[in-house]
Each structure stands twice: as structure tokens, then as C-alpha cells.
Amino acid sequence: RLAAMTTQNRGIVANMRGDLPRALAHYRESLAAYEGLGMSREVCGALNNLGMLYTDMGEWDEADTAYRRASAVAEREDDRAAHLLVMCNMAELALSRGRVDEAESVCARALPLAQELGDAGAEAELRKHRGIIARERGRMVEAEAEFTLGASLASRRQVVVNTYVIDEG
């Protein structure tokens, strides 16, 4: 267990340093160890980390697979907080791929859960995603309202909301 956790943390450090191939190797190794130990919660976290890394690498299909596996584990274990985190990342992936309808569907499922759990960070992230969706659809008033609400939630809770840009060309 300790070796698996240490390997996952080494992946996080490698990722922060920009050494994506090393991060990938560590994440895969920790995932295999967690699976071998039957540690479902940790499997979900490792898959989520893999999904984020694959997203950063532009490996969309691999990211999608990792997130779907993480989502299934979170649902099976009834880990609603983990499922919410994964759904936020799934919405970001969908937006990165230009799949606005898919992102909207994920946000529609995730936002009520974020509100129910009182997770202001997740709600702020989802409001940002919904703002991007509205912007992409030309609904600028709605986009501004979502961005404003997301920023308000984030600042009240001192939450950092990641930013990214969708290529409009």
C-alpha cells in the first residue's frame, strides 16, 4: 500500500515538473498496485490522475477511458465526492475536444450533486464550464452570469478555478 501511494505521489511530482512520460509511468504503476490490492477508492484516484494527464497530453481517447473507468468505480463504491470530481474533469475533457453537448450533459448531472454536497470548488468549476458552453452557443448574457457566479463562489471559498481556452479558430 505504501509503495503504491509513494509511486502515485512520485507521478504527481513528475507531472508538476513537466516530466509527463515519467508521470505516466508512475501513475500506471500505482494504478496496477492499487488494483492488485483491491483498493477501489485509490483506483478511482489513480484513474482520475491518469485522465487529467492524458487530457494535458491531448490523448483524448485515453483520457476518456480513464475517466469512464474512474466514474464506474466511484458509482460502484457510492463515492459521490469522487464521482463529482471525475465528472468535473469529464466536462473539461469534453470542452477540450469541442464536444459542447457532451459537456453540457455532464454539467447537468454534476451541478446538482455539487450543490447537494456543498462543494463550492466543484460548483465554481462547473459554473465556469457552463459559461464556456453558453459562450460557445452565443448566449453571452448567460455566459457572463455563469462566469460571475463561478467567480463569486470561488472567491468566497478561496477556491482556485483552473482556466483554459477553447480554440475558436
Image: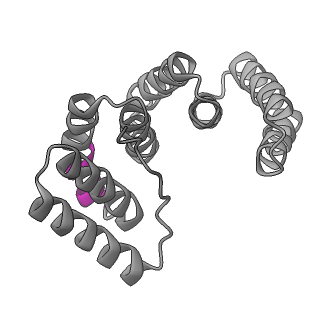
Tell me: 109 left or right of 28: left
Quadrant assignment, res 54: top right
* Quadrant that contains the N terminus: top right
> Which residue lies at the image location 20% right of the left edge and 30% below the top edge?
101
Q: Nearer the viewer, residue 58 or 32?
A: 58
Figure check: 1 above or below 72: below
* Quadrant that contains the C terminus: top left
Residue stretch in magenta? 110-117
Tell me: 33 left or right of 128: right
> Which residue lies at the image location 38% right of the left edge and 29% below the top edge?
75
Answer whether residue 45 is visible to the viewer in this image. Answer: no
Report if residue 113 lies within the magenta region: yes
Answer whether residue 20 is visible to the viewer in this image. Answer: yes
Report if residue 91 lies within the magenta region: no
Which residue ends up furthest to the front in the rendered image?
A: 169
Figure check: 45 above or below 12: above
Q: Nearer the viewer, residue 71 or 161?
A: 161
Q: Position of residue 89 (x, y in %)?
A: 45, 41
Tell me: 92 left or right of 63: left
> Which residue lies at the image location 66% right of the left edge and 21% below the top edge?
38
Q: Position of residue 119 (x, y in %)?
A: 36, 62
Is most of the magenta stretch helix, strand or loop?
helix
Q: How many labels were placed on the picture?
A: 0
Q: Position of residue 95 (x, y in %)?
A: 36, 37
